[in-house]
Amino acid sequence: MSDTVKLTTDSKELELKALSGSVGPKVIDIRKLYAQTGMFTYDPGFTSTASCDSALTYIDGDEGVLLHRGYSIEELSEKSSFMEVAYLLLRGSLPSKDELDGFNNTITRHTMVHEQLSQFYRGFRRDAHPMAIMCGVVGALSAFYHDSTDITDPQQRMIASHRLIAKMPTLAAMAYKYSIGQPFVYPRNDLSYTGNFLRMTFSVPAEEYEVNPVIEQALDRIFILHADHEQNASTSTVRLAGSSGANPFACIAAGIACLWGPAHGGANEAALNMLREIGTPERIPAYIARAKNKDDPFRLMGFGHRVYKNYDPRATVMQKTVREVLSALKVNDPIFDVALQLEDMALHDDYFREKKLFPNVDFYSGIILSAIGFPTDMFTVLFALARTVGWVAHWNEMISDPEQKIGRPRQLYTGPAQRPYVPVAQR
Ligand code: ACO
């Protein structure tokens, strides 16, 4: 393919540049299109539009490939740790031993939250959805950490990023504790990022709590699988919010709000609820029929993806992790069998094959999280905790880009043309 693309309009022929990334399809540079033709492009849902350039994550949806800074998700989830992946996404390369120790130390020392923030929780109803609480308390961080909201200062940007990554587990665990009426548990610096989160979530002051290493490793892997996924809806939300110069805490709160939706991060909660509703394998065909029925809004939750038209590589790792966790905890969850049979039936069904609908990362994650002891409404909170790493890495990448502009899409206007105002008495 050449490096230019010809576009013919009624009145002229235009040559547009075709830009090449390091891997993946070329993109047509249409920045001058309006100036030269007086026309915009129309692409609701950004199905064919690259909104930015980025060096963080590469996805080949047809082949089922996911790379962070060039490393495959299979290798990272097998050999790395969530803290190492966080470093990789933020800084661009894998850390040396000293760099990793230093990063772990920095994150660990930012895990406490301002004591006054704990009083915010008391303003929420006990039955509030924890994502509602997270939207509020993460946005409120900007009221506490004024010394890291000057986004023109790279040092302050990095401090804000560390604070966000470090404080998310504390805030998430507090949301859970509040909902069940137990006291908040302070972080402990001798534990790993994930072990600390497990302890803040599940321990009580009345007795000792020991972190189960199998659970710690499985949850750490789940965090890796959710760390970043290029320009998904919530990351694009964070970038759009940040493009106006908004402070990082407010931007991440915007990302949390977007992630909450059932078509995005809320799908893991919806997928487990669906599997529980199905309940037994003999009821699966009825649900497959509903998913195929155009007059029924029901969709198979945890199935389908905007980018993957092949098996989501994260779902493969997740399915393997379910087996490990259920066997380590000696749990025999019949819902796992329902999930396996549902996947098998859908993958052999013409509707799902033709539309290239495969299980996504959310299909199996709920089964593991439930076995560990998390209630369903915490699932999306865990996703938000892990995705914070990707969000802050994208936010930093965007702010430090000299070509960065405020995000401002255009539209195809379909309302009335200009008309005279009629006073109310004459209408
Ligand atoms: N069940 C049944 N049919 C489906 C499903 C599904 N889960 N997903 C897509 N389809 C069908 C649609 O009805 C549509 O059919 P049509 O062409 O006959 O109208 C076709 O497949 C394409 O679907 P779109 O909604 O146009 O695809 P889009 O890329 O916009 O949506 C999405 C992707 C939102 C993920 C969709 O597949 C979905 O709703 N899945 C269920 C929710 C889910 O699991 N979300 C998690 C995504 S991963 C993540 O955020 C971590």
Image (cartoon, rainbow, N blue to C red):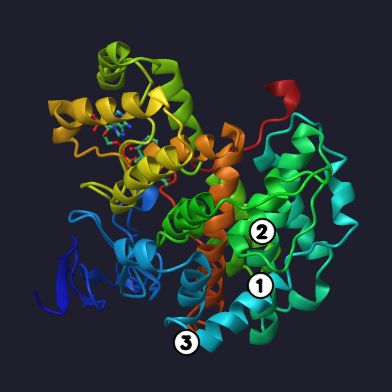
The residue where tag 1 is placed is 107
Question: Left of 283 or right of it: where is 174?
Answer: right
- Which sits in the foreground, 78 or 214? 214
Q: Quadrant of the N terminus?
A: bottom left
Q: Are marks 2 and 3 in contact (CB under 8 Å)?
A: no
Query: Which residue was labeled with disc 2?
Result: 196
User: Residue 189 occupies which quadrant of the picture?
Assistant: bottom right
Q: Secondary structure at mark 3?
A: loop
30 sits left or right of 353 in the view: right
Residue receiving disc 3: 96
Residue positioned 89% across, 48% down in the render = 119
Viewer-nearest residue: 403 or 324: 324
Badge number at residue 291: none
What separation in Å lies between label 2 and label 1 (alpha carbons)?
A: 12 Å
The answer to which quarter of the image holds residue 103 is bottom right
Asked if the residue at tag 3 contacts the one at tag 1, i.e. Cβ–Cβ closer than 8 Å, the answer is no
Residue 358 in the image, given as x and y percentages of width and height:
25, 39
| The residue carrying mark 1 has its beta carbon less than 8 Å from ligand 1 | no
Amino acid under disc 3: Ser
Q: Residues within 10 Å of mark 1 (few under 14, many from 20)?
A: many
**Which residue lies at the image location 47% right of the left edge and 60% below the top edge?**
227
Identify which residue is drawn at 24% across, 37% down. 357
Q: Position of residue 207 (x, y in %)?
A: 79, 45
Q: Amino acid at mark 2?
A: Asn
The answer for how far apart the CA atoms under marks 2 and 3 are is: 23 Å
